[in-house]
Image: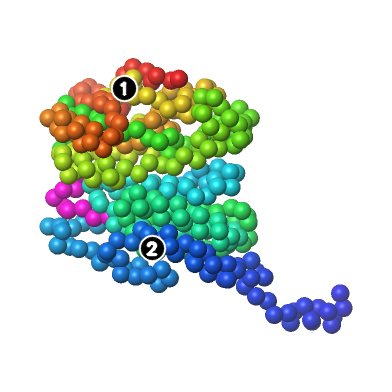
Amino acid sequence: MSKNNQKDASQESLTYAQAGVDITAGNRAVDLMKSAVKSTFRREVLTDIGGFGGLFALDIKKYAEPVLVSGTDGVGTKLRVAMMMDRHDTIGIDCVAMCVNDILVQGAEPLFFLDYLAVGKLDPEKVASIVGGVAEGCRQAGCALIGGETAEMPGFYADEDYDIAGFTVGVADRAKIVDGSTIAPGDLLIALPSSGIHSNGYSLARKVFFEHAGHNIHTELPQLGKTVGEELLVPTRIYANVVKALLTGANVKGMAHITGGGITENLPRILPEGMRASVELGRWDVPPIFSVIKSLGNVAEAEMLRTFNCGIGYVIVVSPEEVGKVSAILSDLNEKFYTIGVIESIPEDGDKTPEVCYRGELPWA
């Protein structure tokens, strides 16, 4: 190249779009998602889309002593399955669910949600589809989507890659916070079924299906009644309506969201010192997806229980006297549930006793 040509190149007027960030596409994405976002607004929302911050007017008159409860999470490597399927309309539900289900545990009402979406190359339709899923999750949870950020990051993510995370804020009356402190021996464990894997254990699930077994997203397995990809993209359940009804009509002592770590790791998080949970493994049906993973990967039962929810997405602890109320509430909601165990005292000589003791065997298909 001649010196003159080098000079011409150095004087070229570069744009942000040439660097890989398309502001026009970003504006179009916002236009496409506006109606979905607005469909989540509650009466307390004071701002429209596009402001620097989301305003939410908390009605403090509803609470004797309001306490804000917050949670944040992402979706994990389930995103890779969405990219493989090129289907992005439900992954936002997972993002909301992982955040909202966590704050429900303490008895909070979800108020609002914010999302953060980072992409390699901004495709307005894809972004609108992802955020549409977030809005659907917010509608299911009863919270408002009052803000978010979409960041186009060329050179950091591949063009087709993206990541999503979220943040939710809820409120609980201080005197009604559910913290597990009153859990006592003899209390019962009431479990609500999951919709599938939810959003945990996907690194193992993908290894089992795609590497170990040699399947792909289009593989149809008779045990599942659908393709591997369709099963792995089933959205995470949001338990907001069920929990709200239970907190209104019964005395709930503790709750656990069964996420990564399964029952083994999550149930102990709400147990007072000196208590353990005795779980009867034969008390609930195991969805086929878990049996398939166990069989294809030759995964030990203990590893399954410590990695996946194995069909139980949420656990509620109540006294035996409250079981009748809980049963009536869940029946009115047509909600399936299982009584899966009981709270026990850890024996005085039980220093090495696990905080979750399993009895029996799961009914693997």
Return the residue found at the far right: 2
In the foreground, 335 or 312: 335
Residue position marked by numbered label 1 in the rendering: 283
Relative placement, left or right, of 50 versus 249 is right
Is residue 356 located in the magenta-colored stretch of the structure? no
- Tell me where residue 188 sits by quadrant: top left
Q: Could you tell me which secondary element the residue under label 2 belongs to? A: helix
Q: Which amino acid type corresponds to the residue marked 1 in the rendered image?
A: Arg
| Boundaries of the magenta span | 169-179
Q: Quadrant of the C terminus?
A: top left
**Can you give x and y, in whole percent of width and height, for residue 317 in the image?**
22, 34
**What distance separates the C-alpha of mark 1 from that of mark 2?**
42 Å
Is any atom of residue 259 visible in this view? yes
Residue position marked by numbered label 2 in the rendering: 38
- Tell me the residue at 46%/26% (across/down): 288
Decide which of tag 1 and tag 2 comes sooner along the chain. Answer: 2
**Can you give x and y, in whole percent of width and height, for residue 272 in the image?**
21, 36
- Tell me where residue 297 sits by quadrant: top right
Relative placement, left or right, of 276 versus 95 is left
Q: Nearer the viewer, mark 1 or mark 2?
A: 2
- Tell me the residue at 27%/64% (across/down): 43
Q: Which amino acid type corresponds to the residue marked 2 in the rendered image?
A: Lys
For residue 203, the mark is none
Render colour scheme: rainbow
Mark 1 nearby-residue class (10 Å; few <14, some 14–19, many ≥20): some
Is any atom of residue 268 visible in this view? no
Q: Is residue 77 above or below residue 40?
A: above
Is residue 175 located in the magenta-colored stretch of the structure? yes
